[in-house]
Image (spheres, helix red, strand yellow):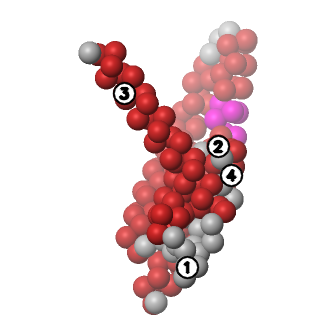
Amino acid sequence: MRTKRLIIAVLVGALCLVIGVASVALANRSTEGAGEVPALRWGRQMGKRMAACMPGRLSRALGAGFVRRPGEDVRGLEPSQERLEMAIERVTENIERLTERLETFQSKLPEYEARIAEIEDETLREFAQRRLDILRQQYELGEDRLAIMRQRLGLLQDQLDYAKSR
């Protein structure tokens, strides 16, 4: 009985996969038109949705003409105001977290340097110094990330303003 259920589940999953691949193919090959068959319209819409959720290479291998990246919606659709507001909230929280981590590191940096100076073994002191240099580089890159995140926040806010004005 369990084996039959497993076989049925696998077959249903395979059928769904075949329908999904066909939908992606239909989405890329059918055109929108007044005389379009409803099944093709459904296939095109489902294909767009499925291709938007697939990883980039897989969607291209299945014939999708576009790839979804984080922060993007399906081609041809504008992001909704709710999604833009949620994205702005997430980016703002990420900026706050990164800023706190940068400030914490900057405040503890003299303490770290003092601890490293106290290490007696020269090799261990060198390892600790190298580790601190790596952390400095990481947090310098963090400042670059912070600037990029602020630019992204500005873009999202502009998109939201535009969406509200429409």
Q: Which residue is mark 1?
A: 35
Residue segment shown in magenta: 132-137
Q: Earlier in the sequence, mark 3 or mark 4?
A: 3
In depth, the one of 85 and 20 nearer the eye is: 20
Vertical comparison of 142 with 90: above or below: above
Q: Earlier in the sequence, mark 1 or mark 2?
A: 1
Q: Spatial distance from mark 1 to mark 3, Cα to Cα?
A: 37 Å
- Which residue is painted at 37% across and 27% down in the image? 8
In depth, the one of 153 and 76 nearer the eye is: 76
Mark nearer the viewer, 1 or 4: 1
Q: Which residue is mark 2?
A: 58
Q: Spatial distance from mark 3 to mark 2, Cα to Cα?
A: 26 Å
Marks 4 and 1: in contact by CB < 8 Å? no
Magenta stretch containing residue 135, yes or no? Answer: yes
Q: Spatial distance from mark 2 to mark 4, Cα to Cα?
A: 9 Å
Q: Spatial distance from mark 3 to mark 4, Cα to Cα?
A: 28 Å
Magenta stretch containing residue 166, yes or no? Answer: no
Which quarter of the rendering shows the N terminus? top left
- Which residue is painted at 73% across and 19% down in the image? 126
In the rendering, at what x and y percent does residue 74 appear? 55, 64
Mark nearer the viewer, 3 or 4: 3
Q: Earlier in the sequence, mark 1 or mark 4?
A: 1
Q: Spatial distance from mark 1 to mark 4, Cα to Cα?
A: 24 Å
In the rendering, at what x and y percent does residue 122 appear? 73, 12
Residue 69 seen in the current view: no
- In the rendered structure, find residue 8 and report the number of the disc placed on it: 3
Q: Spatial distance from mark 1 to mark 2, Cα to Cα?
A: 31 Å
